[in-house]
Amino acid sequence: MQSEKSTTPKWGMALDLERCIGCHACSVACKVENSISLGHFRTKVYYYDHAAINPYNQKPTMKRAFLPTLCMQCEDAPCLTACKPKAITRNVDGIVRIDEAACDGNGACIKACPYGALYIDPVTKLADKCDFCSHRLEADLAPACVEVCPADVFAFGDLNDPASPISAFLKKNAGQLSVLKPEENAKPAVQYRGLGTAVPRAMEQKIPKGRNHDPFSYEIDTWSQLQAEFSPQPKS
């Protein structure tokens, strides 16, 4: 993972939403790798059913979009500011981490996060979140989500290495990248390709603010928007 030319890596990630197939391999691998309890998430894939136009016949159709989410490793992380014991730090390698020895488990960080990325572990009673599988990085391995994705959605690597996958992805897709909820002014470091095109911007509103991801978040909530156009019409 680390280039020989860079002694201090700065880890970065970007996701290509045009490639995501909604298979949940990333979220399942994350749960297994990090022993995450049921009902809690470091990584969550959202679905969004919406009206679209079939590009082949130009007729109305219904489309499902997919949005993988995780900790945005924000440069101005609200969780870090909210943590009174100063148990959360943003390291020089670009990763926001929780010091379990300092965490008091009061959950202020969870309430401050606009991306639903933190939760209190029911076993340890301490805050937990994605840290790009730091234990794997130490072993020169990619994060679990990156390794298992069958569609190559995740571009990850050392931003200080111009030959890394993330550096190549950012160069290739310059001008096509954006971040989730920019209005929160958290300066998220994780970037996305396909927001506003492959994935409607309205989908961002599914990501909870001030609480962890809800395990019951599938598409019954958008069916009412589509029912009038796509439900069977009564015969006259």
Image (spheres, rainbow, N blue to C red):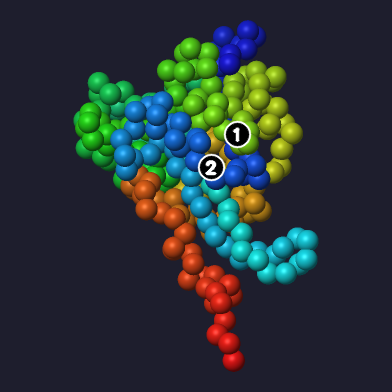
Amino acid found under the numbered disc labelled 1: Pro
Against 152, is 57 above or below? below
Furthest residue toward bottom: 236
Image quadrant in which the C terminus is located: bottom right
Image location (x, y in percent) of residue 50: 57, 63
**Any mark on residue 174, and which?**
none
- The residue carrying mark 2 is 23
How packed mark 2 is, by other alpha carbons closer than 10 Å (few <14, some 14-19, many 20 or more), is few
Across and down, in percent, residue 102 comes to 25, 24
Residue 87 location in percent, x, y? 30, 27
Q: Picture quarter containing residue 109? A: top left
Query: In which quadrant of the rendered image does the N terminus lie?
Result: top right
Decide which of tag 1 and tag 2 comes sooner along the chain. 2
79 to the left or right of 3:
left
Residue 157 shown left or right of residue 208 in the figure:
right
Disc 1 and disc 2 in contact, CB within 8 angstroms: yes
The local secondary structure at tag 1 comes to: loop
- Residue extending farthest right: 56
Mark 1 and mark 2: Cα distance apart in space: 9 Å
* Residue 53 coordinates in the image, percent (x, y): 70, 65
Please tell me which residue is depicted at 53% across the width and 56% down the height of the picture. 48
Q: Nearer the viewer, residue 188 or 164?
A: 164
Numbered label attached to residue 150: 1
Kind of residue sitting beneath label 2: Cys
Is 157 situated left or right of 37 in this image?
right
The number of numbered discs placed on residues in the rendered structure image is: 2
Can residue 148 be seen here? Answer: yes
